[in-house]
């Protein structure tokens, strides 16, 4: 992608709903989620030339940066669990294993990829899917997942590894949809 | 299990970011040195690149995309305006403070920076052993009228030790302080520890590739020319786990 401002605006319009959906679901805080999305685009803008050289798919890269930033924030704030517990107690949000839903989601470009990924996740046995969800979209560590699910840490690691083995086969053929 | 097996087993966990923060730092430091793990982690990240798309899109609030574009471009403009001034200030600081010649190029500075990053990564890695140690063994050593000691930090995650020998005079002429592992099958020669009487000797050691676990360690004084597989000189320290 050429480093021009029009391309940046187009990218922001295309990618923002997915980045926002991901980090909003993880952080449970709209302001923070928007900050993370802004940071992600700033990093992309600063690195756009290098990205072109590496031939790295753009959307997965943006999602990875946003997710890593969200996890960094989750790990930094000790108040996260209290906040989540409070919000869940008030019924403001669903449990961490439930994705955030929007009524007009199918209107967003990239919806077909979401459907494919979602289908791949649904193919996993429930016990593996819940570990992947807590790890990937909840930002939890091994020990936190083990505590939450009441299973040994070795079981968490094994389930995650088995799930990734299946997912990488199912997801590898998916091509980047942002050009 | 070799020290590297831990990294192989935890590649998926590193990509998923489920490692504990200290383990994650350790893994990141390892990646700086291991091409195989770097390649496998990149492959895993690429194969799973679409996984975050499982989260459902959220409609941005009205005006957000414009704010985002403005937030990126305004900062970029600010940086472009500030750049000549910053560059001038940086070159003065470098010329005065660090003695960098005025013809130093960006490439040279990048090389220096890369070297510093490598050094920092190695230091963080070394420090992580002490930080993650689950066993620390200390033994006092007396040499003439000097009293010192041997300190071992055992990191069970990466199967490495940080070894510190302190308070001892320089080894007698023609001799060296020799560190040994005690294993099920006998003593295994490790490194020479050099001590000048003022500063402690320090070494980071991986476990020897011998069958069975390491059961302890020993420190002897050996002839400098000796490469014997068994200790022959006086035993200064002998610790067993």
Image (spheres, rainbow, N blue to C red):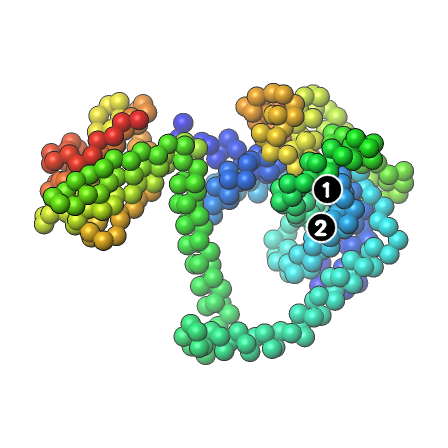
> Residue A165 at what x, y percent from top left?
61, 29
Residue position for label 2: A36
Which image quarter: residue A88?
Answer: top right
Count of all numbered marks drawn on residues in the image: 2
Q: Are marks 1 and 2 in contact (CB under 8 Å)?
A: yes
Residue drawn at the location 44% of the way across and 53% of the way down: B120
Residue drawn at the location 21% of the way across and 49% of the way down: B195
Residue drawn at the location 31% of the way across and 23% of the way down: B212
Rendered image: mark on residue A27: 1
> Residue B18 at what x, y percent from top left?
59, 35
Which image quarter: residue A156?
Answer: top right
Q: Nearer the viewer, residue A170 or B116?
A: B116
Chain designation of label 1:
A
Q: Quadrant of the N terminus of chain B?
A: top left
Q: Check the image and report above or below for B77 versus B38.
A: below
Q: Nearer the viewer, residue B56 or A111?
A: B56
Q: Quadrant of the C terminus of chain B?
A: top left
The mark that comes first in sequence, 1 or 2, is 1
Give SS at disc 1: helix
Which image quarter: residue B76?
Answer: bottom right
Give SS at disc 2: helix
Crowding near the residue tagged with mark 1, few <14, some 14–19, many ≥20 C-alpha atoms within 10 Å: many
Residue drawn at the location 53% of the way across and 74% of the way down: B90
Whole-angstrom CA distance, mark 1 to mark 2, is 10 Å
> Residue A143 at what x, y percent from top left?
58, 29
> Residue B39 at what x, y percent from top left?
52, 42
Q: Check the image and report above or below for B159 versus B196.
A: above
């Amino acid at each position: 992608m050429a480093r021009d401002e029009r391309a940046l605006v187009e990218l922001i319009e295309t990618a923002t709903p997915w980045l926002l959906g991901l980090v909003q679901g993880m952080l449970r805080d709209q302001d923070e989620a928007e900050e993370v999305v802004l940071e992600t685009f700033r990093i992309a803008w600063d690195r756009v030339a290098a990205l072109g050289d590496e031939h790295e798919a753009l959307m997965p890269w943006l999602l990875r940066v946003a997710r890593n930033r969200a996890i960094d924030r989750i790990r930094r704030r000790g108040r996260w669990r209290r906040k989540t517990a409070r919000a869940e107690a008030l019924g403001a949000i669903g449990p961490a294993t439930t994705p955030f839903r929007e009524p007009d989601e199918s209107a967003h470009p990239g919806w077909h990829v979401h459907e494919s990924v979602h289908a791949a996740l649904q193919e996993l046995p429930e016990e593996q899917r819940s570990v992947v969800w807590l790890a990937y979209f909840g930002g939890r560590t091994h020990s936190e997942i083990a505590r939450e699910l009441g299973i040994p840490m070795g079981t968490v690691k094994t389930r995650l590894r088995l799930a990734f083995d299946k997912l990488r086969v199912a997801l590898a053929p998916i091509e980047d949809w942002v050009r | 299990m070799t020290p590297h097996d831990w990294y192989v087993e935890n590649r998926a966990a590193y990509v998923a970011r489920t490692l504990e923060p200290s383990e994650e730092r350790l893994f990141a430091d390892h990646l700086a040195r291991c091409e195989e793990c770097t390649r496998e982690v990149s492959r895993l990240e690429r194969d799973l690149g679409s996984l975050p798309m499982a989260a459902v899109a959220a409609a941005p609030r009205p005006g957000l995309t414009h704010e985002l574009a403005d937030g990126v471009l305004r900062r970029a403009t600010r940086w472009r305006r500030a750049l000549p001034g910053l560059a001038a200030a940086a070159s003065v600081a470098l010329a005065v403070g660090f003695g960098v010649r005025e013809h130093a190029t960006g490439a040279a500075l990048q090389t220096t920076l890369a070297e510093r990053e490598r050094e920092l990564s190695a230091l963080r890695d070394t420090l992580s052993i002490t930080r993650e140690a689950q066993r620390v063994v200390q033994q006092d050593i007396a040499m003439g009228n000097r009293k010192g000691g041997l300190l071992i930090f055992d990191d069970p995650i990466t199967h490495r030790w940080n070894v510190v020998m302190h308070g001892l005079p320089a080894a007698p002429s023609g001799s060296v302080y020799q560190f040994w592992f005690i294993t099920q099958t006998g003593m295994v020669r490790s490194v020479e520890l050099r001590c000048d009487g003022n500063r402690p000797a320090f070494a980071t050691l991986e476990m020897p590739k011998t069958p069975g676990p390491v059961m302890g360690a020993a420190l002897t004084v050996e002839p400098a020319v000796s490469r014997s597989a068994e200790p022959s000189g006086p035993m200064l320290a002998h610790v067993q786990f």
